[in-house]
Amino acid sequence: MILDKIEQLLKEVNSLKASNAEEIETLRLKYLSKKGEINALMSDFRNVAAEEKKAIGMKINELKQTAIEKINALRENIGTSDDSVADIDLTRSAYPIPLGTRHPLTIVENEIIDIFSRMGFVLADGPEVEDDMHVFTRMNFAADHPARDMQDTFFVETNPNDATKNIILRSHTSSVQTRVMETQEPPIRVICPGRVYRNEAITARAHCFFHQVEGLYIDKNVSFTDLKQVLLSFAREMFGVDTKIRLRPSYFPFTEPSAEMDISCHICGGGGCGFCKHTGWVEILGCGMVDPNVLEQCGIDSSIYSGYAFGLGVERITNLKYQVSDLRLFSENDTRFLREFESAY
Ligand code: PHE
C-alpha cells in the first residue's frame, strides 16, 4: 500500500514540469514542505511492520532526494531569464570601499622625521602628561616664570612643595630633552615628535593643542654653526633649494644664546603676502645652544659637553607647505578637508 504510493509519487516527481519560479515554488510546497506529500507518507510509515521499515525508509529517502534534485534542476532550467529569481546582477561593479587618508599633520611630521633621520637623528619619546620637573624645573625655568601660570598650562595635579608631583600637560616637547639626557650618555642626537598643550582660546591662529618636533644634539665641541647648517639643510629639504633662513636673537630659559628661525615665505617666495604679513618671512622654530645649567641639572658635565636644541611647530610648517589658513581645520575631522591630502604621501 505505502509502496504503491511511493512508486506513484516517484513517477509524478520524475515528470514534473514548470515554466517559471512561481510554479516551481508551488511544486516544492506540494511535495517537499512540512505538509507536503512526502512528509504525509510518514503517518503511513508508522504502521509499517518493523522488518520492512528499513527498506521502505530507504525508498522514502530516495523519493525525497529525487524530488529535491528535480526541483533544483527545474530552477536551473528556467535560468537567469526569469528575473523574479535572478534579481542580483553579479556583473555590476561594486561600490568602492572608502579608504582613509593620512592626516596632513602626520604627512608633514613623517617628512620632518625622514629629513632629520637622514642627518643621523634617532627618535625619542616622552609622556604628554608630565611633571613640572621635566617640563620646567630641569629646563631652567625660574620659579615665577609665566609659563607656569594656570592661564598658560593645564594642571592635572598640583603640589607646591614637590615639582615631581605637579602634574601638567606638557607645554612643549623640550621635556623629552630632559628625559633623554637623564638616561643617555652623550653623544646624543635625537628628534622627539609629539603633541603639546597650552591654555589658549581656540582661534584660526591658536589652539589648546598642537604638535612640535624637538631636536637635541649633545657632543664634544658642538657649535652654533653646526646648528645653523642643520637647520638650513632642513629648510631646503622641506621647502626647496631656494629657501633662505634668518635667525633672530631670542630668549628661552633652556638655551643660551637663543634664536628664532624664519624661512623665506614659501607662498609668495619672499616678496610679501597676507600669509607672511607682507614681511617675506615666516617663523617656524625656536632654537639655541643648550644652557649649561640644563646639562648640569640632567647630569651631563658642561665642561666637557655642549649641544644645541630646536623645537619646530608642525602646524606652522603644514600651513606653509599646503597653504592652510585656519588651524581649526586640523582637528575638526571634516573629510572634505582631509580628502584634499589623498594624493600626498
Ligand atoms: N620649547 C620651545 C617652544 O616651545 C622651542 C625651543 C625648543 C626653543 C628647543 C629652543 C630650543 O617655544
Image (cartoon, rainbow, N blue to C red):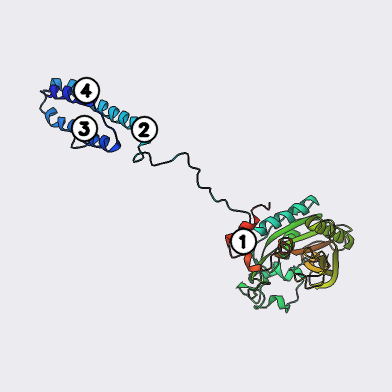
Marks 2 and 3 close (CB-CB < 8 Å): no
C-alpha span from label 3 to label 4? 17 Å
Query: Which residue was labeled with disc 3?
Result: 31
Depth-wise, is mark 1 or mark 2 nearer the camera? Answer: 2
Q: Which element type, helix, strand or loop, lies under badge 3?
A: helix
Residue type, mark 4 in image: Met
Q: Residue at 77% x, 51% y: name it.
A: 117
C-alpha span from label 1 to label 2? 49 Å
Q: Residue at 14% x, 25% y: name it.
A: 5
Given residues 280 and 79, the one toward you in this image is 79
Residue type, mark 3 in image: Tyr
Residue type, mark 1 in image: Phe
Q: Check disc 4: other Cα within 10 Å, few if <14, some if 14-19, many if 20+.
A: few
Query: Which residue was labeled with disc 2?
Result: 79
C-alpha span from label 4 to label 1? 69 Å
Q: Which element type, helix, strand or loop, lies under badge 1?
A: helix
Relative to 161, say whether 304 is above or below: above
Q: Which element type, helix, strand or loop, lies under badge 2?
A: helix
Relative to 295, say whether 29 is above or below: above
Depth-wise, is mark 2 or mark 3 nearer the camera? Answer: 2
Depth-wise, is mark 2 or mark 4 nearer the camera? Answer: 2
Q: Where is residue 226 in the image (x, y as percent from the top left)?
A: 87, 59
